[in-house]
Image (cartoon, coloured by chain):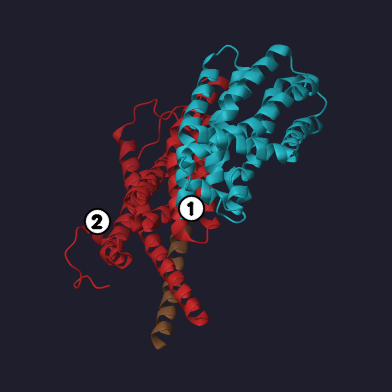
Chain colours: A brown, B red, C cyan
Amino acid sequence: MIELGPHAAFIIWAYLGVALAVAGLVGWTLLDARRTARKLALLETRRARK
Amino acid sequence: MSIQSTPKQSWWNRIAHPGQFVAWSAPWLWPLAVLTALLFAMGLWLAFIDSPQDYQMGHTVRIMYVHVPNAWLSQFVYGVMALSALGTLVWRHPMADVSMKAAAPLGALFTALALFTGALWGRPTWGTFWEWDGRMTSTLVLLFIYLGIIALWRAFDDQLRAARIVAVFTLVGAINIPIIKFSVDWWSTLHQPASVFRADGPRMPPSILAPLFVMFAAFTLLFLALHLKSMHTEIKRRRIATLQRKAAQGHTA
Amino acid sequence: MSGFVAMLRRELALSWRGGGNVLTLVLFFVITGAIVPFAVGPDKPLLARIAPAIIWIAAFLAMLLGLDRLFRPDHEDGSLILLRQADLPLSAVIAAKVISYWLVSALPLILASPLLAVLLGMDLPAFARTLVSLLLGTPALAAFGAIGAATSVTIRHGGLIAPILIAPLSIPVLIFGVGTITAAQSSAAPLFLAALSLMAMALAPFAAALAISLAED
């Protein structure tokens, strides 16, 4: 473990917060993309069947 | 929808068609994501292992490597939105709407992260989480503007109409942001002596600049990748809305 | 030009007939200002010190709350469509509306501000500076407000959207407005305030006209 000095907590929390937020953003973007794609596919097949 | 059947056009016109845009830009997505991940790995390694502590700030200088890229993105994303707004109003480019809408939540998040890391950096260096200094205050106002734009997008049912109105407001905001920045600077120097630490004060050695630039590139590419992905999602969402409208009309007819 | 004057006269007549609105706005302004001492405590020196801030916040909120009736009644009864087809450019129509909005909402607030000044224990020079700053700053608030009202006019429940959009943009007005009152040593603030008002009054009608014609297509 690297030495981070007396303010280690602040540094770790800053990186942790950014990592969590970015991970959440990436996850949400992918989830949204997948959900929308599935819905579109459903609608397209329903339209094709008609 | 296929590229082969269309006549030869300039890339600008070609990507005006949503399907063509997705086909044209989808191959960029994976290389962009891989490059972003590599840059993040390299940036984190540089930031934690291969860079010295600052002689004034000690180890807290490492917060800068996430703070400054987020602060840069908070303004860069607004620039992207303002350019897209011009694209919507002047050229009526259909992809400009989509770009504008996809960028707004990303910009809001990066601005919030800039404030968050700024607060965590401010506590050890200034002794307080929040200081009403010019830079932090105008970033907070920028966050409010982003949130207002998102609220405006959500208030409309018709996204095509929303795009044009949001574009007008985005440009009004773009004219206003320098004024806000100036007025806030004037205000904070009036109320407190300029005793706070200035990031641009000491010259930075290359060992600190290297991780900073790598993180800059990493965050910017991260934004571009996420922006592209959410543009694709937004295009699909509009296609869904069109299909649903057609289906509803088919039932009533 | 006669069209512009006719437009101005129509707006003033309409708000004069519905005089209750003007009175409500003034009441809102006075009550907001008078409620602060209950939150702060009856500490006269402190109140006198923050009086400029209280008056400006009260005026700011009152102007933002009145925005919704700038274009919405005209949108709802369809006269906005007719106004768009008039010989007078839409931006001139909006300029007339902004001027009349200032006359019926900002001017009554300024006239009512002596009441608040007495309640909050301001001294005479400070009050004089308050009057100047309100006179110089409220046109900018009205002009920014027109942009906010124009962007939200076609939204069905858009009443709260306009204040949310406009409040961040109005921060410079607030800063220089209060600066005009408190910073007697710095003479730049009233100039900045006047510059903001002039710029906003000149540019906002075009932006608002663009937003309205794009929204109604």
Q: Quadrant of the C terminus of chain C?
A: bottom left
Which residue lies at the image location 49% right of the left edge and 51% below the top edge?
A16
Residue C168 place in picture, x, y as percent: 55, 38
Look at label 2 and name its amino acid.
Answer: Trp
Residue C22 place in picture, x, y as percent: 72, 36
For disc 1, the chain is C
Q: Secondary structure at mark 1?
A: helix
In the image, which disc is placed on residue C215?
A: 1
Q: Is residue B114 visible?
A: no
Which residue lies at the image location 74% right of the left edge and 20% below the top edge?
C48
Which residue lies at the image location 66% right of the left edge and 40% below the top edge?
C14
Front residue of A27 and B50 = A27
Front residue of C71 and B20 = C71
Look at label 1 and name its amino acid.
Answer: Ala
Say whether residue C175 is left or right of residue A28: right
Instruction: Kindly indicate the quadrant of the structure image that contains residue C206.
Output: top left
Q: Which residue is mark 2?
A: B12
Residue C202 place in picture, x, y as percent: 47, 31
Dot 2, crowdedness within 10 Å: few (<14), some or many (≥20)? few
Which residue lies at the image location 71% right of the left edge and 24% below the top edge?
C111
Please tell me whether residue C133 is drawn above or below residue B145 in the rendered image: above
